[in-house]
Image (cartoon, rainbow, N blue to C red):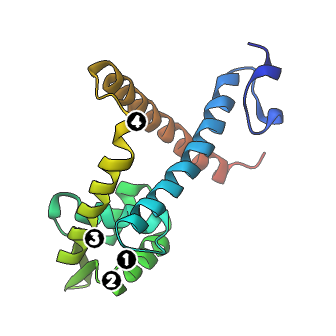
Amino acid sequence: MSDNNRIVSSQHLVSPKSPELSEFEFGLIIAWHAFGRWMMRCMTAAGVKDMTPMDVLVLHHVAHRDTEKRMADIGFVLNVEDTHVVSYSLRKLGGLGLVQSTKRGKEAFFSVTDTGREVCMAYRDVREACLMPGFTGSAEDNAQIGELARLLRTLSGRYDQAARAASTSSL
């Protein structure tokens, strides 16, 4: 495929080593924004307005497996380097009565409230009703989605490694 026929956000960034990477990056950009819109609108439909994608992610992770979580662990799992971002979401979610914290020594542990759990289940219901009809559920389609998930995790590691290299680079 000619470089002129590739769908990319920035032609000047296309590398001859992997022009497909620029196509992937553009796909990631538009997918991230679509996913962010989806999370906010799904949460609004579930009954909670004015939540950012980060707020939604933090809420669902705190609810994950119904176990208490430390702020640092939440940031680690969600790959959020700036703890202030997670802290802001936790304060907002606490103010909405969706999460609560328990202090043990100097450490705060966060858990979902009954209201937060209900909101997560309402979000799941909206997700099932609005998003899932677009998927077949076939073994082949699910295998492709699983492979894509593995590729995204691999590439996120490469981007993180490159970010560390760039922060110490003096090109």
The amino acid beneath tag 2 is Gly
**For mark 1, does the 10 Å Cα neighbourhood hold few (<14), some (14 to 19), or many (20 or more) residues?**
many
User: Residue 153 versus residue 53: which sits nearer the camera?
Assistant: 53
Where is the N terminus found, in terms of image quarters?
top right
Q: Position of residue 44 (x, y in %)?
A: 42, 68
The image shows residue 168, relative to residue 82, as above or below, that is above
Please name the residue shown 58% across and 40% down the image: 28
Which of discs 4 and 2 lies nearer the camera? The answer is 4
Lower sequence index among marks 3 and 1: 3
Mark 4 falls on what kind of element?
helix
Lower sequence index among marks 4 and 2: 2
According to the picture, the residue beneath numbered tag 1 turns out to be 90
Where is the C terminus found, in terms of image quarters?
top right
The amino acid beneath tag 4 is Gly
Mark 1 falls on what kind of element?
helix
Occupied quadrant, residue 11: top right
Tag 1 and tag 2, C-beta contact below 8 Å:
yes
According to the picture, the residue beneath numbered tag 4 turns out to be 134
According to the picture, the residue beneath numbered tag 3 turns out to be 70
The amino acid beneath tag 3 is Arg
According to the picture, the residue beneath numbered tag 2 turns out to be 94
Task: Please tell me the numbered disc located at residue 16.
Answer: none
**For mark 2, does the 10 Å Cα neighbourhood hold few (<14), some (14 to 19), or many (20 or more) residues?**
some
The amino acid beneath tag 1 is Leu
Which of discs 4 and 1 lies nearer the camera? The answer is 4
Mark 3 falls on what kind of element?
strand
